[in-house]
Image (cartoon, rainbow, N blue to C red):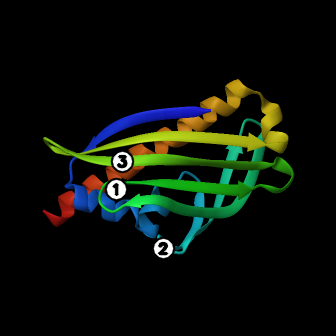
């Protein structure tokens, strides 16, 4: 399944880029994230707890960055295994553009699930994936803008 969107964040592009590469910011923005460690260069390890329909699972997995154009764009990819619940994997192409009032962040997300999760049906899964994606980028915008206000 694929989802895309655009948000204008009230911060300069350098700040938005720095926060897209910051483990603490990513941890705060990923819904259900319990742990996130690592670096953009080496990749991140994550533990995420989620409930999808009747299935609750703890996913352990890796997140990596590729196609990095500093200050402009990257692809963030992740894959998590949730034991008997199955697996979830996906990625997002993220790009930044200077606009009046801040930075335009554009994203295109691709997600896929397998195992018990895949048996829930595409409507439940696609609704869940859209909600996760929207929550991440909404939280990201709030985090960056709140810090920008504190720094001003």
Residue 64: image quadrant is bottom right
Residue beneath label 1, please? Answer: 143
Determine contact: label 1, label 3, CB under 8 Å: no
Residue beneath label 3, please? Answer: 95
Residue 46: image quadrant is bottom right
Question: Which residue is at a point 42% across and 45% down the rendered structure image?
Answer: 137
Quadrant for the N terminus, please.
Answer: top right
- How far apart are the alpha carbons under marks 2 and 1? 22 Å
Residue beneath label 2, please? Answer: 41
Residue furthest toward the top? 123
Question: Which residue is at a point 73% across and 35% down the rendered structure image?
Answer: 53
Q: In this view, does 74 lie to the left or right of 45?
A: left
Is the residue marked by circle 2 packed among few (<14), some (14-19), or many (20+) residues within 10 Å?
few
Circle 1: element type: helix
The x, y position of residue 32, in whole percent, is: 59, 54
Residue furthest toward the right? 84
Circle 2: element type: loop
- How far apart are the alpha carbons under marks 2 and 3? 18 Å
Circle 3: element type: strand
Question: Which residue is at a point 58% across and 40% down the rendered structure image?
Answer: 110
Mark seen at residue 68: none
Indicate whether 30 appears above or below 107: below
């Amino acid at each position: 399944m694929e989802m895309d969107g655009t948000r204008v964040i009230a911060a300069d592009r350098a700040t938005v880029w720095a926060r897209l590469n910051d483990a603490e910011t990513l941890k705060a923005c990923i819904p259900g994230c319990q742990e996130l460690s690592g670096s953009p260069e080496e990749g991140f390890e994550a533990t995420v707890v989620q409930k999808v329909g009747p299935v609750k699972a703890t996913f352990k997995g890796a997140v990596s960055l590729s196609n990095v154009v500093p200050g402009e764009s990257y692809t963030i990819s992740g894959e998590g295994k949730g034991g008997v619940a199955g697996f979830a994997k996906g990625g997002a192409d993220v790009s930044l553009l200077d606009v009046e009032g801040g930075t335009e962040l554009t994203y295109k997300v691709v997600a896929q699930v397998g195992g018990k999760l895949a048996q829930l049906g595409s409507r439940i899964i696609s609704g869940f994936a859209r909600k996760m994606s929207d929550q991440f980028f909404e939280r990201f915008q709030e985090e960056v803008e709140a810090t920008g206000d504190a720094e001003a």
